[in-house]
Amino acid sequence: MASGGASVASLWTEVNRCGQNGDYTRALKALTKILHENRDDVTALHCKIVCLVQNGSFKEALNVMNTHSKVLGSEAVFEKAYCEYRLNRVESALKTIEGAPEQTDKLKELYGQVLYRLERYDECKSVYTDLIRNSQDEYEEERKTNLAAVVAAMSQWEKAPLDDLGLPESTYELCQFLLCRVSLADDSDVTEEDIESELAVIHSQMAYVMQLQGRTDEALQLYNQVIKLKPSDVGLLAVTANNIITINKDQNVFDSKKKVKLTNAEGVEYKLAKKQLQAIDFNKALLAMYTNQADQCRKLSSSLQSQNPGHPRPVLIQVAQLCREKQHSRAIELLQQFSDQHPESASGIKLTMAQLYLVQVMSYSNTCVNSLMVIPPQVSALVTMYSHEEDIDGAIDVFKQAIEHYQSEQPGSAAHLALVREAANFKLKYGRKKEAISDLEQLWKQNTNDIHTLAQLISAYSLVDTDKAKSLSKHLPSADTMSFNVDVDELENSHGATYVRKKAAKVTGENLPKEQGQGEIKKKKKKKKGKLPKNYDPKATPDPERWLPMRERTYYRGKKKGKKKEQIGKGTQGATAGASAELDASKTASSPPTSPRPGSASGSSAAPGSNVVPPRQQKPAASGATRKKAPQKKKKGGKGGW
């Protein structure tokens, strides 16, 4: 027994040494030997559970705790809750913590993490606030960082107002970029890739801020750098890939299809909030629509609608897909059905219905207007549509209903008075001065010092009741009161002035004023005489139509048609135009016709004394033979000849 006791003591010494060195695998071997001697040793069991947790063997540690639950009791409550939390059994971890006999600081820290994972942000905020108030150790900065994350989540997902909790701006997470650079750069075993991998979260957050600022190119570059680093955090990869898809939209869909695979990694559902997972699912449905996967888009949007029955986005995705398929009537029917079932979300749905009615270019103008009638903020859109249809009475009726609504809900508010003023201006614009009087009187009673409104009211009354207009004109200020100290020169030289008075040139020493009578004589420009045509005849009467184009003159008869122009190359080979004319016997006045006239003798021979050579007679072609042209011989020394 003595030797056994000495052996156990040496084993505990080794466990202590390995624990200090962080060699938990070797410590486990020593603890296994100790438990072989005494399997119910509570301290050895607890140490074994801690070593398994440190090595990431959460399932094995949980099995040890469940097997020896009676022996351990409440000794390892924190370790059990932590293993359940790391195995994504969040509800079980919550029950374990709430059932603990004592709420230690470690359990409270874990309790805050569990509540954050369950998205119970209000309770989580209370836990961290209490911890920060009642704890003073080296983990205070991390608690403040976690509290800032809780407040940000409440603002992002629950639209809660941001409370000033007095948190410092230089927390650990916010300074992580510099801290990693400083602390890891001194370690020779840490590479630049390891440092960038640690900073991937910060890079992704910076890219998201750039995306919100509209710097999409810079954000996209930073997002892709994070993807290339391949961080081990699947939640970070999923969020980064989703943000890239939102930048791509309907462009670069092949890249989006690659990135969407990162959002399907195992364990993503445990790393992200429900709102984040919901946004990713919405983008998957939209990507299916952009890639013309209609069936997949309908399947995803229908699944989203069943999971979120009151959310309008799945219905809008289905409507967008129907519009791509030119099924506008079906899309409007689907929107109307959702609007009737969920009136709290009807505002955006009705705006989409109105847009579809307008896109259809059908006789749905009245239906479009009626669908917006229940939305007071859309008065401007309604009035614009009525004005486009030249239905002034309908537009005035819209103003009337909107004013009555604000009169009952927010009388005298800025929105109410703005509507009254717009209604008055609209009526005056379309010559409805009599109808604008009541609105103008209401505005003037609110502010009797408003001269502009008073002038409009007097102008309106001048066409209806002149006596009333005269009585109101007494409230106008006098001319002396209305005179203003205006710098005319500054007004004329201001931007937008239509007329600018030229400034007088400054008098310098060289340009002294001349004596009287020695004023500058303006040089007169000599008038140049116009040039006359070369064939100008001063005695001849000029053509009165000489200024008109030739085609518009009365004596223009147009070009003669049918007369062939004399061109070089016509006639026999080598002959010029003049020679052809001379050789043409028909153009010679003294020559008789070459062909016999009716009733006369044959004139085949030339007249005596004529120097015209008659055309040569060609032999008639033989019967059935092909007529060939005789070759012509060139005359030596000439350009051409017979």
Image (tube, helix red, strand yellow):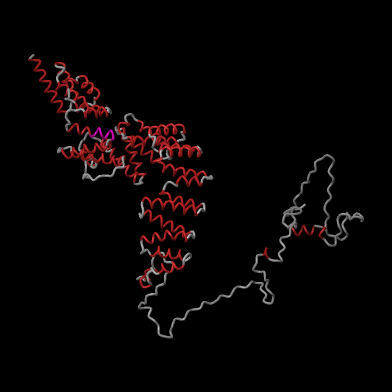
Return the x and y of residue 600 as percentages of the image width and height. Answer: 92, 56
Magenta-colored stretch includes residue 26 = no
Question: In the rendered image, which quarter is residue 175 located in?
Answer: top left
Whether residue 576 is visible: no
55 displayed left or right of 460: left
Question: In the rendered image, which quarter is residue 247 located in?
Answer: top left
Q: Is residue 12 above or below residue 524?
A: above
Q: Nearer the viewer, residue 422 or 240?
A: 422
Whether residue 367 is visible: yes
Q: Looking at this view, name the residue that lies furthest to the left.
A: 2
Q: Nearer the viewer, residue 381 or 21?
A: 381
Q: Nearer the viewer, residue 481 or 595?
A: 481
Return the x and y of residue 365 as percentages of the image width and height. Answer: 51, 47
Q: Looking at this view, name the residue that lies furthest to the top.
A: 1
Q: Nearer the viewer, residue 339 or 131?
A: 339
Q: Which residues are magenta?
A: 112-119
Q: Identify the residue shown where x is 44% and y is 81%.
A: 520
Examine the residues drawn in magenta and state their main secondary structure.
helix
The quadrant of the picture occupied by the N terminus is top left
How many numbered circles are shown?
0
Return the x and y of residue 470 as percentages of the image width and height. Answer: 43, 69
Return the x and y of residue 441 as percentages of the image width and height. Answer: 41, 61
319 displayed left or right of 184: right
Q: Identify the residue shown where x is 42% and y is 49%.
A: 378
389 displayed left or right of 552: left
Q: Is residue 588 above or below residue 173?
A: below
Question: In the rendered image, which quarter is residue 519 located in?
Answer: bottom left
